[in-house]
Amino acid sequence: MLNAMNTKPLRFFRRGEIVTLPAVDPSRTLLEVLREDLHCTGTKEGCGEGDCGACTVILGEADGDRVKYSAVNSCIRLAHSVDGMALWTVEDLTQADGSLHPAQQAMVDCHGSQCGFCTPGFVMSLFGLYQTTQGEAISREQAQAALSGNLCRCTGYRPILDAVQAMQALPRVQVFETELLLNLELLAQISRGLQADSAYMSPRSLADLLALRARHPDAQLVAGCTDVGLWVTKQHQQFAKVLDLTQVAELRRVDDYPHHIAIGAAVTLTKAFAALVADRPHLTEFAHRFAGLPVRNSGTLGGNVANGSPIGDSMPLLIALGASVVLMRQSGRKLAHRELALEDLYTGYRTNVMAKDEVLAWIKVPKATPAERSRVYKISKRFEDDISAVCLAVNLQIANGRVQKASIGAGGVAATPARARKTEAALTGKPWNQTTIDHAMSVLRQEFAPISDMRASGAYRSAVLGNLLKRFWLEAQGTVLTDLRQLAPTGKNEVTT
């Protein structure tokens, strides 16, 4: 039932015109609006949790003088969060003369569809990559990365990957971005004139965000919706008021300082991990494995940290890197802030120290130093687009053959993302050798008492913790571990690395 509080109209640009929906409940998902209100049934509901990609759509936002295209899961995206954006569904790709878009035609030519249920989502991921690459050649690795959020249970992926690469050879189809940017600016002007205190609030400045938080401390705060969306689709929660911080200009930035980077709470996971990888290139694989691309395009680092799930993958890494969080609130006519270590944010399962009128504004991450040796490991049943059973991040400062400093973050082993302080103590000041590692492995396996659940048993998790520390040691000694993803077939009965 529609919230009694004023609900501002939802407006977005689609098919060359501004679409206006006057009364959309703040808890409704974009997928519900597309299928039930606009009858766009090409966008499918598969899992309802951002896991299969059948509901993938493309969002467009102004990014300077260009348009940024992002594939997102519409099943866990709140509808009002796309206000002021451009939207494409699979129905929008066919040309005026009835011809297929290259993303569609390539799927036909390469036999990339079988039952067809997942196909619209794959096509939209192809379309997003098509717009982003602007005719450049696409490697197999790029194709796999673009489809990391899409699952197919019929064809296997080889013909779909073929289609990704084949679409670039077809005649180009252009999006008229100049016209699109003008319409996006028009939508932005309309939005600025709307009442701020509505059922779904989406402020554009930090001052407005904190003022609204002070007035509406009971509003559900969202920053990407990839967790909150699950509360709607799986737990059937409804929210009387929603406060969305993803359009706050100050919080959409990554600021580079001499000794740290500051990542705003509204920065997407895609952009946040790009900043972390720029400083620590070895995090590239972990960034890819964190989640499928549509989840990373929609979710934010601030949302992941504030939500505090014990199996959230960013927190163990950030704890190991020595990250801190900046909390802000309105205090009278001034803005007040406080900073604390990330691990000190949490008090229990999905609970934290934030006051009702406080907002997590920034995550500050120290930059890598020459003495640093850091790695992060994710153990999950699928390589990508899956939740961890165990996540371990290790960061050691080693000099003169001794461990000068140790910082270790662990996920999936306690009620909160945790710091392995006993294991850190077992390493700090000790010689960097096998004896030290063997002892630290034993300490790490006993430091936590993980539960058994659908992902892994507690005993498995404890054993894996120690094994991952051993892996860190072996890699530090130059051991090259077998990686099945690097094996390539060379003949009928042989493989090579």
Image: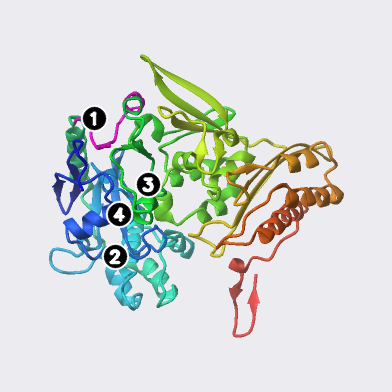
- Measured in 3D between alpha carbons, the distance from the residue under mark 3 to the one under mark 4, in whole angstroms, is 16 Å
Tag 1: residue type? Ala
Image height check: is 88 above or below 299? below
Q: Is residue 294 left or right of residue 57?
A: right
Of pointers 4 and 1, the one earlier in the residue sequence: 4
Query: Can residue 168 be spotted in the picture?
Result: no
Q: Nearest the camera: 271 or 354?
A: 354
Q: Nearest the camera: 273 or 168?
A: 273
Secondary structure state at the residue bearing disc 2: loop
- In the image, residue 198 lies in the stretch drawn in magenta: yes
Please tell me which residue is depicted at 37% across the width and 70% down the height of the picture.
163
Tag 4: residue type? Ile
- Measured in 3D between alpha carbons, the distance from the residue under mark 4 to the one under mark 1, in whole angstroms, is 27 Å
Q: In the rendering, at what x and y percent does residue 127 appear? A: 31, 60
On the image, numbered disc 2 is attached to which residue? 44
The residue at the far bottom in this view is 492
Please tell me which residue is depicted at 17% across the width and 29% down the height of the picture.
193
Secondary structure state at the residue bearing disc 3: loop
Of pointers 4 and 2, the one earlier in the residue sequence: 2
On the image, numbered disc 1 is attached to which residue? 196
- In the image, residue 24 lies in the stretch drawn in magenta: no
Of pointers 1 and 3, the one earlier in the residue sequence: 1
Secondary structure state at the residue bearing disc 1: loop
| Mark 4 Cα-neighbour bin, 10 Å: few <14, some 14–19, many ≥20 | many
Of pointers 2 and 3, the one earlier in the residue sequence: 2
Magenta segment: 195-211
Q: Are marks 2 and 1 in contact (CB under 8 Å)?
A: no
